[in-house]
Amino acid sequence: MQRRFTLKTMAAASTLAALGLLSACSDSKVVQFHSVDITGADYAKNFQLTDFNGKPRTMEDFKGKAVVIFFGFAQCPDVCPTTLAELAEAKKLLGADGDKLQGLFVSVDPERDTPEVLKAYMAAFDPSFVALYASSPEKLAETTKDFKIYFKKVDGKTPGSYTIDHTAASYIYDPSGRLRLYSRYGAGAKPLADDVALLLKGA
C-alpha cells in the first residue's frame, strides 16, 4: 500500500515538474512588444526608392539594423515632426546600440519635397536618418499601395496651397529585414526603444 502510494506520488510529482518545465519554456518564448506584432505579414516587404543623394535604395541596403519606416512630408505641421523626434530620442535611449537603428522617411509630397529639402529635413532630427522618394507618381502609388499607406492631397486656405492627409504610423523591421511591428502614432520614444532593443536581441 505504501509502495503504491509512493509510486503514485512520484508519478504526480514528475507530471507537475514536467508541466512546470513546459510552462517555463513556453513563458520564455513570449515576447511582449509595445507595438502591434505583425510578424509574417505578406505586405511591405521591400521597396525600390531613391534617397536624397540620388542613390537607388532597397531594404537590402539596411540589413543588419532595425529599421523604422514612416511615410510623410516635410511641411507636415505636427505628425511627421513628432514621429521623427520620437525616433531620434529612441535612438539616444538605445545608447551604444543606437547606431543599429535606421530611420527611413518616405515622402508622399513629390511636388515640394526635393532632395535638398529632404536632406535638410532629416538633418534637423538625426543626420543618420535617410529620406526616400519615388521616381514617379506611379511608383509612389505602387509603393504606398504595397505598404498599405493612405495619403490624399487636401487644398489649403489660400490658392495653390495644400496639405496632405496620410497614415500616421510606422513599420518596424528586424535586422534581417523582416517586417515585425506596427507602431501607432504617439506611442512614445521609450516604448519604441524597448521594442527595437528586443529585435536587436533576436526577439
Image (cartoon, helix red, strand yellow):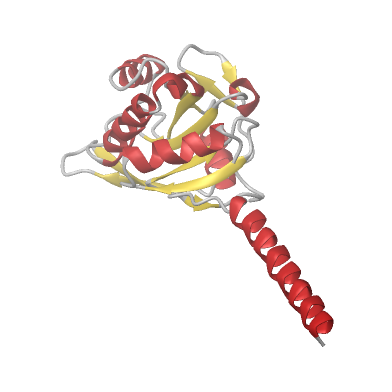
Point out the residue furthest to the left here: 158
Q: Is residue 81 left or right of residue 106?
A: left
Is residue 101 positioned above or below 162 on the image?
Answer: above
Q: Nearer the viewer, residue 193 or 79?
A: 193
Residue 11 picture quarter: bottom right
State the image coordinates of residue 117 (x, y, percent, origin top left): 33, 18
The residue at the point 50 percent across, 19 percent down is: 51
Q: Which of the image's four quarters has the C terminus?
A: top right
Is residue 139 positioned above or below 144 on the image?
Answer: above
The residue at the point 42 percent across, 39 percent down is: 194
Q: Nearer the viewer, residue 65 or 80?
A: 65
State the image coordinates of residue 81 (x, y, percent, origin top left): 27, 33
Residue 54 in view: yes
Residue 91 picture quarter: top left
The residue at the point 48 percent across, 49 percent down is: 33
State the image coordinates of residue 178 (x, y, percent, origin top left): 63, 38
Q: Is residue 163 left or right of residue 39?
A: left
Point out the residue furthest to the front here: 2
Is residue 24 positioned above or below 74 on the image?
Answer: below
Q: Which of the image's four quarters has the N terminus?
A: bottom right
Q: Is residue 17 left or right of residue 175?
A: right
Q: Is residue 192 left or right of residue 49?
A: left
User: Disc count in the image?
Assistant: 0
Residue 130 in view: no
Point out the residue furthest to the bottom here: 1
The residue at the point 27 percent across, 37 percent down is: 82
State the image coordinates of residue 188 (x, y, percent, origin top left): 31, 42
